[in-house]
């Protein structure tokens, strides 16, 4: 959901900025930002963010899978 933050395992906190849906109401695109200062589990401002876990809702699970894939791309690009 827009505005929500999640911690990606072994990586950063990401925040959902917006989602795009098709005519059937299915999520087709997730627009996110990440906070590079949160790598490794620390939050400079002390906020608590829950990690990505299992979710019975298919749409939420799909979004989490997309975020996980994006996390992998970011980690690989940083060496």
Image (cartoon, rainbow, N blue to C red):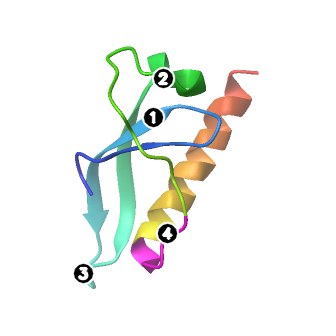
Mark 2 nearby-residue class (10 Å; few <14, some 14–19, many ≥20): some
Specify which label sits upstream in the sequence, 3 or 2: 3
CA distance separating discs 3 and 4: 20 Å
Disc nearest the viewer among 2 and 4: 2
In this picture, is 18 found above or below 21?
above
CA distance separating discs 1 and 2: 6 Å
Disc 2 is placed on an element classified as helix
Q: Main secondary structure of the magenta part?
A: loop
Contact between marks 2 and 4 (CB within 8 A): the answer is no
Q: Residue at x 28, y 48 (%)?
A: 4
Quadrant in which residue 71 is drawn: top right
Q: Residue at x 42, y 68 (%)?
A: 60
Q: Residue at x 26, y 79 (%)?
A: 25
Specify which label sits upstream in the sequence, 3 or 4: 3
Mark 4 nearby-residue class (10 Å; few <14, some 14–19, many ≥20): some
Disc 3 is placed on an element classified as loop
Mark 1 nearby-residue class (10 Å; few <14, some 14–19, many ≥20): many
User: Residue 28 versus residue 5: which sits nearer the camera?
Assistant: 5
CA distance separating discs 3 and 2: 36 Å
For this view, does 49 lie left or right of residue 73?
Answer: left
Contact between marks 1 and 2 (CB within 8 A): the answer is yes
The residue to which callout 2 is attached is 38
CA distance separating discs 4 and 1: 17 Å
Residue 13 numbered tag: 1
CA distance separating discs 3 and 1: 30 Å
Magenta-colored span: 54-59
The residue to which callout 3 is attached is 23
Q: How many marks?
A: 4
User: Residue 48 versus residue 23: which sits nearer the camera?
Assistant: 48
Q: Position of residue 77 (x, y in %)?
A: 69, 27
């Amino acid at each position: 959901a827009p505005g929500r933050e999640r911690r990606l395992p072994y990586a950063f906190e990401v925040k959902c900025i917006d989602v795009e849906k098709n005519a059937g109401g299915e999520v087709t695109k997730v627009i996110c930002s990440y906070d590079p200062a949160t790598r490794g589990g620390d939050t400079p401002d002390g906020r608590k963010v829950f990690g990505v876990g299992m979710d019975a809702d298919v749409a939420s699970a799909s979004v989490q899978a997309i975020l996980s894939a994006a996390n992998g791309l970011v980690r690989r690009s940083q060496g």
